[in-house]
Image (cartoon, rainbow, N blue to C red):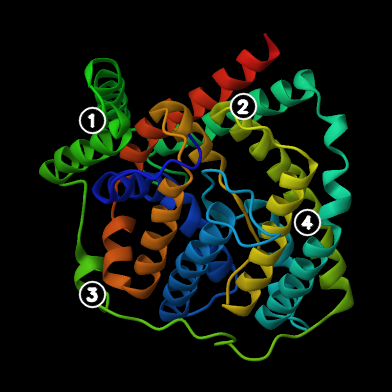
Amino acid sequence: AVDERLPLPRLSALGLQHVLVMYAGAVAVPLIVGRALKLPPEQVAMLISADLFAGGLVTLLQAWGVPGVGIRLPVMMGVTFAAVGPMVAIGTNPDLGLLAIYGSVIVSGLFGVLVAPFVSRLLPLFPPVVTGTIITVIGISLMRVGVNWAAGGIGNPNFGAPLYLGMALFVLVVILAVTKWGKGFVANIAVLIGIVVGCVVAALLGQMHFAKVAAAPWFGIIVPFQFGWPVFDIGAIITMCLVMIVVMIESTGMFLALGEMTGTRVDGDRLTKGLRADGLGTLIGGIFNTFPYTSFSQNVGLVGVTGIRSRFVCVAGGLILIVLGLVPKMGALVESLPTMVLGGAGLVMFGMVAATGIRILA
């Protein structure tokens, strides 16, 4: 059940599983934006920590919920890739820069909170044939991400090396084997087991390195407006508000997919609360030196793989994200996960998303 409260050790393991699955995507946006703006390494590291910290707060807001805000489903929140292009364009403009990004993100978050009730009225335009198609397309499009991870990640000079593909296949087989023959809790954390086993093998093969872990500090404080007071430019604000509309439509598809997977009815009121959390989360992101937030589709697939519907799993995941944001050394340890290991896990989960869409169409 969505509101089922599992034992703390089980919640922690399942929450960690959700965090590991989303981590690569969660840190990708601050890395891309930071490097595009030619920020020094310590500021890029700060962007990543801020992203994880704010992502944890927004996940709690969405999964735990407060009055009038939060869909209260097993949702993990992360920075949306839809905003990368516009943010890089704003940030590299010599008349605007990073502070204009934060100004536009803050205003677009307020915009999202205000328009959430109107966007939720589009729900009648999402009958099963539309919902099934959207979810199937999401799953199929995510498979490309999983394949790229399995091949070693875009930009890797050895992209597609047999070692990478073999490791990804090994992790995929381990996950499927644990899912089929494992019982109870062991089957529920099949993806986590696959990732851990894959990391052990990768470390033995010299494919997992810990230099960044040793160099990272133990504790870091996330301060609002650390780069300075935001700049509010009308052109940048309009651009990010348009991005916010795209994010909310994307989130609607995610919420409907989760509703199908968890057997929970997502009506207009519940959808409004979920979309309002997207807007409020984006506002929080702008304040804490990070970017617009949305529900991560990777984690939708994980719900399908594990069969665990409890939203408190993602609440635990949100708390873990906050810890990772405040303890850079822990964040660096998770960041050291080999991309091909995540690729093997991603192929299983993204396939589950597509399978859910096909089931709805049927």
Q: Is residue 151 visible?
A: no
Q: Amino acid at mark 3?
A: Ala
> Could you tell which of marks 2 and 1 lies nearer the N-terminus?
1
Alpha-carbon span between mark 3 and mark 2: 44 Å
**Residue 225's disc number:** none
Alpha-carbon span between mark 2 and mark 1: 24 Å
Q: Position of residue 293 (x, y in %)?
A: 62, 59
Point 47% across, 80% down: residue: 43
Which circle, 4 or 2, is nearer the viewer?
A: 2
Which circle, 1 or 4, is nearer the viewer?
A: 1
Residue that badge 1 annotates? 186
Q: Amino acid at mark 2?
A: Glu
Q: Is residue 217 above or below residue 252?
A: below
Query: Pointer 4: residues within 10 angstroms few (<14), some, or many (20+)?
Result: some
Q: Position of residue 257 (x, y in %)?
A: 63, 31
Q: Is residue 126 above or below residue 213?
A: above
Horizontally, residue 207 falls left or right of residue 2, namely left
Quadrant for residue 315, please give it.
bottom left
Question: Between 83 and 117, which is closer to the camera in this rendering?
Answer: 117
Point 50% across, 29% down: residue: 350
Q: Amino acid at mark 1?
A: Val
**Residue 243's disc number:** 4
Query: Pointer 1: residues within 10 angstroms few (<14), some, or many (20+)?
Result: some
> Could you tell which of marks 3 and 4 lies nearer the N-terminus?
3
SS at mark 1? helix
Residue that badge 2 annotates? 260
SS at mark 4? helix
Alpha-carbon span between mark 3 and mark 4: 36 Å
**Residue 215's disc number:** 3
